[in-house]
Image (cartoon, helix red, strand yellow):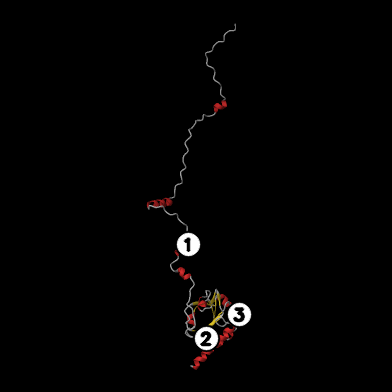
Amino acid sequence: MAPRAKATTEAAEPTRRSSRISAQPKVDVVAKEPATKKVAPKASKKRAADESEGVEGGEDKAPTVKKSKADTAEADEPAGAAEDKAPATLSPIDIGDVLPSYILKNEKDEDVDVASLAAEKGVVFFLVPKADTPGCTTQACGFRDTYPDFTSSGFDVYCLSADKPTAQAKWQSKKNLPYPLLSDPKRVLISALGAGDGGKTKRSHFIFEKGGKLVDKKMPVKPVDSPKFALEFIKSLKSSASES
């Protein structure tokens, strides 16, 4: 009979762990912290102050609206400035009416009060649609060639148009015009005389006696006839004065 195995009282030898695993440091398990809520960025002091003012006033503050530069300029514009920008107007001038005071520029870019032109002498205004164009040059040269006849009769001659002074000066120099040229770019005086026609100037002429009263006008008139008719009327005035 086989001998019975001897029972052992010694404890079984523990299983060996790998030296590599045992050498690793022991990791403590940390409890996962609950996720924290994201805090909204703190409002700036200025915004906080504005909001507090709105709450204290008992109503929400209206959002700020950015103004454009044009709006800002308009708001800062003094009262009455808008009215100054509007083009000036003159009352209609008809036969028997007096030449009003109004400032225009001459071909030298100098200010001229048209009312003062008739203070000492009679005045002839001939109006042209555009400087240095064929018809207007014919009219202007006609007054140039008869200019001594006008001045000897006690009348000064002026060309009136909506052209700029620089354009008038070039035309004057080019054609040797002996009389001044007046610039009315907004056609204020031109319109008052009835010669403003939808942004254009009607060819015409107007004669004011000494003192500024309008005594004759021709509108429309042909370029070649304008100086001739104007001089004939002035001579008729002279004849009437001598007879009386």
Residue 71, numbered label: 1
Pointer 3 residue? 135
Locate the N terminus by quadrant: top right
Amino acid type, label 1: Asp
**Location of residue 160 in the rendering, given as x and y in whole percent from the top left corner:** 54, 79
Q: How far apart are marks 2 and 3 (CA)?
A: 24 Å
Q: Residue at x 47, y 62 (%)?
A: 71
Q: Nearer the viewer, residue 11 or 78?
A: 78
Q: Nearer the viewer, residue 214 or 173?
A: 214
Tell us which disc is closer to us: 2 or 3: 3
Mark 2 crowd level (few <14, some 14–19, many ≥20, 10 Å Cα) = many
Question: Which circle's residue, 2 or 1, is located before the other in the chain?
Answer: 1
Pointer 2 residue? 155
**Location of residue 165 in the rendering, given as x and y in whole percent from the top left corner:** 55, 76
Among the 4 quarters of the image, the one containing residue 141:
bottom right
Q: Are circles 1 and 3 on residues that touch, CB within 8 Å?
A: no
| Outermost top residue | 1
Element under disc 1: helix
Q: Distance between the residues labelled 1 and 3?
A: 47 Å
Mark 1 crowd level (few <14, some 14–19, many ≥20, 10 Å Cα) = few
Left or right of 45 on screen, residue 166: right
Q: Which of 193 and 12 is in front in this view?
A: 193
**Location of residue 76 in the rendering, given as x and y in whole percent from the top left corner:** 45, 64
